[in-house]
Amino acid sequence: MKPHLDPARPEHALTRTALRASGRADILLFLLVSTIASTAGIQAWQTLINNFAVDSAHLGADAVGFVQSIREVPGFLSMLVIYVLFVLSEQRAASLSILVLGIGLAATGYFPSFWGLTLTTLVMSTGFHYYEPLNQSLTLQHFNTFEAPVVLSRVRAVGALANIAVGILIYFLSDAMGYKGMFAVVGAVVAVAGVWGLFKKPCETSGAPQKKKMYLRRKYWLYYVLTFLEGSRRQIFIVFAVFLLVKKFDYSIQAISILFIINNAINYFLNPMIGRAINRFGERQLLTVEYAGMILVFLTYAYTDSHIVAGIMYVLDFLIFNFNVGVRTYYQKIAAPEDMASGMAMGFTINHIAAVVVPVLGGVLWMVDYKIPFFIGVGLGVLSLALTQCIRIPAKPAAR
């Protein structure tokens, strides 16, 4: 029998004993291992890629922007994961995605050219972007509206620990191993996690049967719009914030690694608090804080001439970015249980519509004035902040 859930303390239902009693211990372990592999893989890629592009591939801002846009194409097509579910279970499809991510990452260092980087990025990104909607769908299906924020935050916190390990590894071994060795080692570890998942049966329980088709519903319009804006804002952060640190302030790969370690150390302690804060204060309040902070960060990026201030803003940017879990938990509270998989897949696709365009457009605008992409980020923050005030949660959401 499923243990009693105290809405004020959902973590009571997430102890090891309670999870085993409810048949959900295996799915949580599966999500933890798979997410650690996914976040560690993408973290290694993000830590290394800008320096690799400049030092080894000799790419400029416009070429880096193009590669980053190519990285988002699989995200734009992630809605097609719905059709994969006709052949594979969500768990198997998620594990296969992790394996593809690892293979693409491991191959990156062997192709230090524009087209080589484009190809390996496409492979790596396909794995990453197909895993993410499956991960979120599985979480929202197997954990109810009070548990899901805590689970999502807990998984992110463990992922942050993995990212710290990656940052330390890169910091101490990058000179000795070089780009090729670093990409290969981390990619191999990620691929092994994918193989592990393929041979593991994670679920003793099953969620509601999922609709295996793509569609948009008017009642989810705010989720779609916030997801679209989040994708645009995310790309400015991922592509141009790090590029600013490397290009304008001459941050070395070791310095970028230190920033990533600091970010993830903070996130390890912060993420569990975010889950509890969502249950206490609600999605609207948390997202309001995120978008207000986002406006401040992008304005500072545009005007600061201090490498220290820029680094601090990057840490703050990374910190408030974690609040976007509120968009997913908002959707869970307004959506039908059978819409979880399709909603996450469609949301991921919508998120990446702008993500395909923003890096290329931003790269061209950067060549005119590096401040322009960050001014665009400020505009996105203002619009997101206004729309967030439209969030309305049912007074008594069902504890699915």
Image (tube, rainbow, N blue to C red):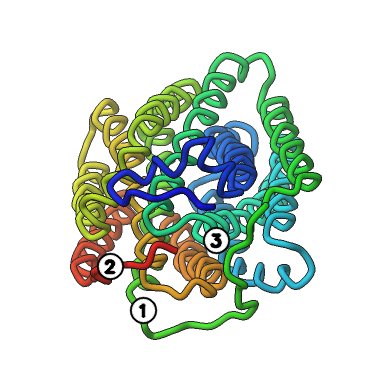
Instruction: Residue 27 in the image: state x and y as whole percent.
Output: 62, 47
Determine contact: label 3, label 1, CB under 8 Å: no
Label 1 to label 2: alpha-carbon separation: 21 Å
Type of the residue with mark 2: Lys
Question: Secondary structure under badge 3?
Answer: helix
Q: Which tag is nearer the camera, tag 1 or tag 2?
A: 2
Q: Which residue is mark 2?
A: 396
Residue nearest the viewer, comparing 144 with 274: 144
Q: Residues within 10 Å of mark 3 (few under 14, many from 20)?
A: many
Q: Is residue 184 placed above or below 281 in the rendered structure?
A: above
Q: Residue at coordinates 47% horizontally, 37% vertically from top-left?
A: 15
Instruction: Residue 200 in the image: state x and y as whole percent.
Output: 76, 45
Q: Which residue is mark 3?
A: 137
Residue nearest the viewer, comparing 26 with 315: 26
Type of the residue with mark 3: Ser
Inspect this view and state whether residue 50 appears: no
